[in-house]
Each structure stands twice: as structure tokens, then as C-alpha cells.
Image (cartoon, coloured by chain):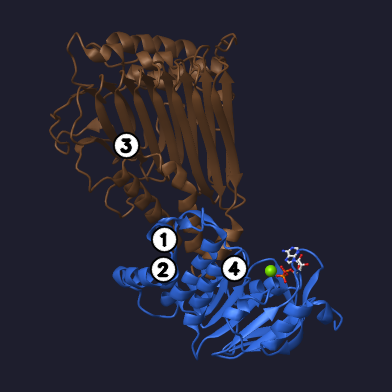
Amino acid sequence: MALLKPKAPEPRALEIAEARIDALTLPEGGWAEPARRDALARLRADGLPIRRDEYWKYTKPDTLTAPEAPEAATFDAGEPPVFDAFDRLKIVFVDGVFDAEASDDLALEGVEIERLADSRADIHWAKDVYGQLEARGQSPVKRPLATLNTAFASDGILVRVTGKPSKPLSLIYHHEATRSDAILHHVVKVEEGAEVTLLESGPAAARFNKCMEVEVADTGTFRHIRAQGRDHERRAVTHIFGRLGRESVFQSFTLTANGVLTRNEVVLELTGDNAIAHVAGACMGDGDFHHDDTVFITHDAVNCESRQVFKKVLRNGAVGVFQGKILVEPGAQKTDGYQISQSLLLDDDSTFQAKPELEIYADDVACSHGSTSGAIDEEALFYLRSRGIGEAEATNYLTLAFLAEAVQEIADEDLQAEIVERISAWLFRRQAR
Amino acid sequence: MLEIKNLHVKLEEEDKAILKGVDLTVEAGKVHAIMGPNGSGKSTLSYVLSGRDGYEVTDGSATLEGEDVLGLEPEERAAAGLFLAFQYPVEIPGVGNMTFLRSAVNAQRKARGQEEMSSSDFLKEIRAKAKDLQIGQEMLKRPVNVGFSGGEKKRNEILQMAMLEPRLCILDETDSGLDVDAMKLVAEGVNALRSPDRGFLVITHYQRLLDHIVPDVVHIMSNGRIVKTGGPELAREVEANGYADFKETV
Ligand SMILES: Nc1ncnc2c1ncn2[C@@H]1O[C@H](COP(=O)(O)OP(=O)(O)O)[C@@H](O)[C@H]1O
Ligand SMILES: [Mg+2]
């Protein structure tokens, strides 16, 4: 809708892109090659993000666009891995390389799973999605790191959901090499009436560029719960591009604790009437931590609902960023759009930048957005302490309480409890130090 | 048990004296009531004793069993046996009532070097005590005080007191906002806790609570000082004549 003339890319953006491209090899052959070549051409034309870009105003892209990944030590949190107790189909990647040994058999009723790197057949359903949703998501704002991903992704999974698989699919990303640079691209197609839950966990690499395209057909349901890796020095830029059909459901939740730099973008298009999209995130940052949630939801059908619920707890100089937009196209009447982004700043050194936006071209809609940044509630803190609960523990409770609204967006109660458990462990472990 | 001597308190942020020399001793096994007009400093006294920020003690002392409490953190005072039932209990969204109480009980036990309470013992005890106060399961599961009516909040305070078994209980206007039935329930809860080794400081604006929680000693506070001390008859005097008589003595 925006009638802005596309700006010519800055020469610097093009230089950076060329330097990055030089360090990579375009995978050849197979059904994805045309999409990859198209993406490469787009990348060459658009360049990579630079600091001056409006869309990167609050987050420095340099280390994400550099030819090589900055070093990142691995970190053992000393806890059982997240989702460990859940019955799930494990799909393991180590530094971005699929690990068949560590993974389960990919056969599961109701779902077809293939590796991107394996899938060499000429005709493939994924052709209609791979790079397609990503390309649609380039307007009105360019997301060149996703384009780079489409071109150069070395692996990933292709999931076609035809039924209701009995357990979640669980992508596990191990990080072993201190300079690993992983580019993974996943495609998920949820067919009519089908339903799937996808879990993601782990740091993946020193630097991780991940793109996931999700097509949810009419009446399909896609649920996504992600716990990003705890390695302190890891960097990640992730994109989710989703297209939602009539009466479909899309729910995505992300937990982020640690990581020196994270940029998570979610770009959704609600194209069928009565679709529902919920995107939520809880993030805890302590010290050298920069976390950016950038969300763009387009309503292009009638009576759809979207919710964005993002909560960030920051201390010791941690930085949180939220850029969230709801765009309601003409004719998208009865849109119900909700967006909230809040930060809890546990000290004066930490900062939160928020840019909430609404752009509405229909008259019969209900959209609201709010963004707040606050300190711990002193009244509540004193109340807890007056009952004998120490200050640090009381602060943890209030922190958990603050994050609760985001965590409650997880539909499954057991998974919700698992995430609460993780947050709790993170908070109390830090308190003990 | 509680000994307050010549306590002077001002606001931290501004030069406003609120308590201007309070002297008060509460013995174990006794119920002391403090009555007084609005703004006389009753809540301030309760907050200063429990360690809330924002006040500065400029003179005097307060000890519990001989130990200075004014230098302790709020949680240390709680562990030492001091409990304040708030005039305005705080709502804490996202923290379950039960979780909260259990951490409080165990934090205090830990601070005293006692073993933590097992979850089954805790459950048994809280169920029984909640029942006496007509607090349902549902209220126990809800976030602390969130969506509670005025009366429910006050009953929840008494439940906390019953679970924490403090040595000195301060009740700040626990009767305000309660109808007669709720007040009786609260009074029963308090009376059940009366024991030879526990002291009470019951702050109230009206005499009616004292019909149900019969005090041993009544103090009148006005303009930051205890201006008169007597027996239960003092409360009835206030009821009949208001506070006007006492203001003049200041
Ligand atoms: N935090 C505060 N800020 C400003 N004034 C206060 C504060 N706390 C107490 N006061 C003032 O101190 C006086 C005593 O208040 P309070 O202790 O609440 O009285 P009571 O409980 O007897 O009604 C009042 O004049 C009140 O306005
Ligand atoms: Mg008061």
C-alpha cells in the first residue's frame, strides 16, 4: 500500500552483499535452483542491510552481514535440553548440518518430511513455496538477509502436513564449532484441515541465518514453539514468512534467553477470511545482549484476528527492540488486531526501543497497540518481601509474572509449563550467582 | 515483645515529619489497639515497622524481642516474626496465591534454619486454614489478590498470617471495607491466633472491630504521637465522642 518510491540501494549495501556472496557457494541443481538464482539476483540488486537503513535503526546488522561469522563459544547451561521430556520427532542439525544418526526416522503418519539438501526430484510441492513467500515478504520493506538465505541455504527441512501427526516435530540445533556459520531454510505446508506443532531449540551455530516459510491452507493449524539457544555469544537472524488461508490458525511463540545478537522477523499475510494469527515472545537479557523482534502482519481478508504479545526483561545493559506493524488492506473489514510490547527494565543501564505501527485502510476494524517500558513494581516487591521472600527471589516472581502474558499465548498447557520452567530456572540460576 | 521508644519518622523525599515521638510496648500474649483519626500516622507506623522504603527514622528505636528491627530488611523482619496485614493488600498478577504463600513459608523457615515444609503438609495446612476463613480452592489458585473483593483481600491477609505464624501481628485497618459477616470471620481468624507468646497491634479507625477482637490495651494516636492509653473502655469513649477530645491534648 505504501506509495513510497523504492529507494535505490546504497553502494555500500551492494558492496557488502558482494563480499558476502563471495564467501558462499550457490548450491546447484534440483528443483530449488531457479528460486535460488532468482534470490541471488534480488540480493545483488537490493544489497544487504546497513546501519543507515530505517528498518535497522535499532539493531546493527554488521556482524550478521559480514563475510565471516564472529567467533562464539559454546555454553552448557547445565540443564536437561528443553522439550527433553516430550514425545517428539527429533530432527537434529549440528552447526547447520543434518545429523541422521542423532535424528529420529523421519517417517510419521500425517506428515511428509524431506531434507532440502536431498530433495532433487524435478517436480516438488515445495516449489510453490520455497522463496515464494520470502519474495512476497520483500514489500513494502526489504529483508535481504532472508533473500540471502533463499539463495544460499545449505539445508533445512521440507514438511508437508496432510493429517494430524501424533507428536510434534522437533528441530534441534546444536552448536559445536566456534566459528560455524549456518544457513538453514525450512518450508512447511499445512494442507486443508491438517494440524502440526513444530518445536525448535538450540543455538545452531556461532552465527545462524534461518528462514522458514509456512503456508497454512484453509482450516489448517500451525503451532510453533521455539527456544533459542542459550550460548551467550551466538548471533541469529531468523525470518518466518507465513501465508494463512481461510479459517486457518497460526501460532508462534519464541523464548530467548542469552545470545549476543538476535533479530527475529515474522511476516504474515492473512489472505483467507476468519484466519487467526498469534505471535508472541518472551525474552530475558542480561548484559551483552541485543534482541530485536520485528513483526509485520498484513490483514487482507475479512474477520481475521491477529495478536502480537512481546515481553522483554532486561538488565545489566541489555537492549530490547520491538518493531511491529499491523497493516489492514482495503476490504479487510472486521479485522481484530492487537499488539502489545512491553519491557521490564531491572536497572537504568538497560534499554528498550519500540516502534509500534498501525496502517489501516478499512473502516470497520478494531485495532489496538500499546508499548510500555517500566521498572519493577515497588509496591508489589515490598508486599512479597514483607512476607519473608528475599528481594532477589521476589524480583524473580515479579519477572515471571511480567512474562506470563506472553507465555500464556502457548496453547498447549504442558509446553507452556515447560517454558515457564525454563524461564524460572534461568532466573533463579542467575540469582544464585 | 515489641518496644517502640521515642520514634520519630519523616518522609525520605521531603521534610515532613509524620511520627513525632511514639512510645509503645506490646507484651507477648496481649492485644494492643491503636485508634486515631485519618492522617494521624497509624499506617506510617506499621510501614516503618515492616520496613517499607520512603521513610526516614530520625530518632528513637524499635525492637522485637530485644533485637533492633529498624536496621533489618523487610524479609528479615518477617523471618524475625513480624507480620503486617496491609490496609491495602497489593495485587500481583501472574503470581499464584498458593505459590506465593509456599515460597513465603519456606523462605522464612530457611532464614530461621528450619527445614522446608513438604508440599503435602503445606497443602493440608492451607486447605484447613482457608476453609476456616471461607476461602475457596479457586481463590487459592488465582493470582495474589487479583480480582478479589475488598473482603476477600482482607481474608487473604489473615490466611497469610495464619500460615506464617508470626510472633507480632500488625493489622492495619483490617476492618475497613468489610461488612459485619466478613468482619466476624476475620475477627475469628485473628482470635484463633491469640496465644500467650504472640502479640497483636490492631490499628483501626472505628471501635466496631474491637467488639470482636477485644483488646487488652487501647492507644489513641493523634498527629504522630500516642496521646492517650487505656483499657477497652477508651475505645467506647471514642465511639461516643469522636476524636475531638484527644486532638486538644496535643
Ligand atoms: N508516602 C507518603 N507521601 C506523602 N505523604 C505521606 C506519605 N505517607 C504518609 N503521608 C502523610 O503522613 C500522614 C500520616 O499518614 P498515615 O500514616 O497514612 O495515616 P493514617 O494511617 O493514620 O490515616 C498523612 O498526612 C499522610 O498524608
Ligand atoms: Mg491508614
Please identify the quarter of the rendering in which residue B205 is found. bottom right
Check chain identity for marks 1 and 4: say if they share one: yes
Estimate the x, y position of residue A20 in percent, counting from the top left. Answer: 42, 21
Q: SS for tag 1?
A: helix
Q: Nearer the viewer, mark 3 or mark 4?
A: 4
Q: Which residue is mark 2?
A: B130
Q: Which chain is blue?
A: B
Q: Which residue is mark 1?
A: B140
Q: Chain of mark 4?
A: B
Query: Within 10 Å of the Cα at label 3, are there few (<14), some (14-19), or many (20+) other Cα atoms?
Result: many
Q: Nearer the viewer, mark 3 or mark 1?
A: 1
Query: Within 10 Å of the Cα at label 4, are there few (<14), some (14-19), or many (20+) other Cα atoms?
Result: many
Q: Chain of mark 1?
A: B
Please identify the quarter of the rendering in which residue B72 is found. bottom right
Q: Amino acid at mark 4?
A: Phe
Check chain identity for marks 2 and 1: say if they share one: yes
Q: Amino acid at mark 2?
A: Ala
Q: Chain of mark 2?
A: B
Q: Are marks 2 and 1 in contact (CB under 8 Å)?
A: yes
Query: Within 10 Å of the Cα at label 2, are there few (<14), some (14-19), or many (20+) other Cα atoms?
Result: many
Q: Amino acid at mark 1?
A: Leu
Q: Amino acid at mark 3?
A: Ala
Quarter containing the C terminus of chain A: bottom left
Q: Residue at x 57, y 54 (%)?
A: A376
Q: Earlier in the sequence, mark 4 or mark 2?
A: 4
Q: Are marks 3 and 1 in contact (CB under 8 Å)?
A: no
Please identify the quarter of the rendering in which residue B47 is found. bottom right
Q: Is residue B159 above or below residue A100?
A: below
Q: CA distance from mark 2 to mark 1?
A: 8 Å
Which of A227/A326 is in front? A326
Q: Which residue is mark 4?
A: B86
Q: Which residue is mark 3?
A: A204
